[in-house]
Image (spheres, rainbow, N blue to C red):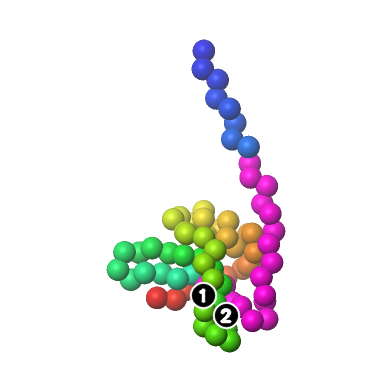
């Protein structure tokens, strides 16, 4: 008899970012559709990559982790 182990739910660890100088951004590739979530420094324009987004679930995880209600897209 086969037994399946239930997947333990990940405990979502809340993380912080510099809300004054950084804004959440989803960098999207026009060519291949890849999406990367991260933060863009508004002073320097430098992008800090946090995670690769493969699905809506990944995007929701990013938003929940950092307490975001919306993320702007950049191409």
Residue 60, horizontal then vertical, whole percent? 56, 58
Q: Main secondary structure of the magenta part?
A: loop
Horizontal side of residue 13 vs 72, given as left or right: right
Q: Which residue in the structure is indicated by mark 2?
A: 41
Residue 33, horizontal then vertical, whole percent? 35, 64
The answer to whether residue 72 of the structure is visible from this angle is: no
Q: Residue at 63% of width from left, 67% of height from top?
A: 68
Who comes first in sequence, dot 1 or dot 2? 2
Q: Residue at 68% of width from left, 47% of height from top?
A: 11
- For the residue pair 24 and 42, the one nearer the viewer reads as 42
The answer to whether residue 74 of the structure is visible from this angle is: yes
Which class describes the residues within 10 Å of circle 1: few (<14), some (14-19), or many (20+)?
A: some
**Image quadrant containing the C terminus:** bottom left
Q: In the rendered view, would you say 55 is above or below 37?
A: above
Helix, strand or loop at label 1? It is: strand
Horizontal side of residue 10 vs 27, given as left or right: right
Q: Residue at 54% of width from left, 63% of height from top?
A: 50
Q: In the rendered view, would you say 12 is above or below 24?
A: above
Tags 1 and 2 in contact by the CB under 8 Å rule? yes
The magenta-colored residue range is 9-25
Q: Which residue in the structure is indicated by mark 1?
A: 47
Q: In the rendered view, would you say 67 is above or below 4?
A: below
Which class describes the residues within 10 Å of circle 2: few (<14), some (14-19), or many (20+)?
A: some
Q: CA distance from mark 1 to mark 2?
A: 6 Å
- For the residue pair 21 and 64, the one nearer the viewer reads as 21
Q: Extreme left residue here?
A: 31
Q: Extreme bottom residue here?
A: 43
* Count of all numbered marks drawn on residues in the image: 2
Picture quadrant where residue 19 is located: bottom right
Q: Residue at 38% of width from left, 63% of height from top?
A: 34
Helix, strand or loop at label 2? It is: strand
Residue 37, horizontal then vertical, whole percent? 51, 66
């Amino acid at each position: 008899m086969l037994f399946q182990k239930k997947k333990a739910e990940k405990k979502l660890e809340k993380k912080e970012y510099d809300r004054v100088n950084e804004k959440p951004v989803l960098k999207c590739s026009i060519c291949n559709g890849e999406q990367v979530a991260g933060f863009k420094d508004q002073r320097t324009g430098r992008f800090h990559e946090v995670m690769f987004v493969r699905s809506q679930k990944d995007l929701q995880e990013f938003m929940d982790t950092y307490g975001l209600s919306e993320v702007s897209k950049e191409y």
